[in-house]
Image: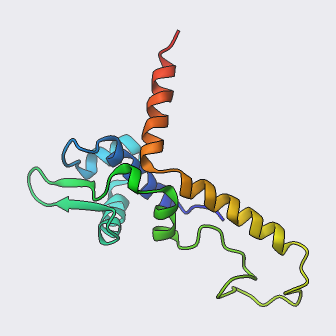
């Protein structure tokens, strides 16, 4: 159920691009510095996200990355599924279970795990990059309130 470090980096990079959406291309070095992501990993992650249709890029002087869609059109769930695969994997359930369970069909825990999976997916799918940008702006503004 955990989100891999690679996925966390991808989420943070896309969040940074969402914060700057509409303001042109952003260099990898800027994203890496602001979001505390090792630059050598970030380049590979952004290229993977480009192939997935999340970002667009341009090389050379003045080059960089930008979101391929609006921040409201990309959810945390979309990103996690693209980078990590399943959001919440139940090892003994689904189309391709990781292991066979002798209790299949009689397991008292399976409904609990399925309910947890649904709840986690609902949270991730309901949070767009725009939601996070707006939430960040609210936090930042409240930090300066007296």
Q: Is residue 13 visible?
A: no
Q: Quadrant of the N terminus?
A: bottom right
The image quarter in which residue 102 lies: bottom right
Q: Give how far across and how far down residue 112 sits, in percent.
A: 82, 67
Q: Residue at x 32, y 48 (%)?
A: 17
Q: Is residue 114 above or below residue 41?
A: below
Q: Tell me how the rendering is colored.
A: rainbow
Front in this rendered view, residue 41 or 46: 46
Q: Is residue 41 above or below residue 31?
A: below
Q: Residue at x 19, y 49 (%)?
A: 25
Is 63 left or right of 136, judged from the image as shown? Answer: left
Residue reaching furthest top? Answer: 146
Is 3 left or right of 129, judged from the image as shown? Answer: right
Q: Residue at x 47, y 43 (%)?
A: 131
The image quarter in which residue 59 lies: bottom left
Q: Give how far across and how far down residue 138 sits, in percent.
A: 48, 28
Front in this rendered view, residue 26 or 78: 78
Q: Residue at x 27, y 48 (%)?
A: 29
Q: Is residue 17 visible?
A: yes
Is 72 left or right of 27, judged from the image as shown? Answer: right
């Amino acid at each position: 159920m955990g989100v891999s470090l690679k996925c966390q980096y991808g989420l943070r990079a896309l969040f940074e691009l969402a914060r700057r959406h509409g303001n042109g291309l952003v260099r990898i070095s800027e994203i890496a510095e602001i979001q505390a992501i090792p630059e050598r990993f970030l380049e590979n992650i952004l290229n993977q996200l480009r192939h997935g249709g999340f970002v667009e890029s341009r090389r050379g002087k003045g080059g960089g990355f930008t979101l391929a869609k609006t921040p409201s059109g990309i959810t945390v769930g979309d990103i996690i599924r693209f980078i990590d695969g399943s959001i919440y994997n139940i090892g003994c359930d689904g189309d391709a279970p990781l292991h066979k369970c002798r209790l299949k069909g009689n397991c008292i825990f399976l409904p609990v795990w399925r309910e947890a999976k649904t709840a986690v997916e609902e949270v991730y799918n309901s949070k767009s990059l725009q939601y996070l940008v707006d939430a960040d702006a609210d936090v930042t503004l409240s930090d300066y309130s007296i």
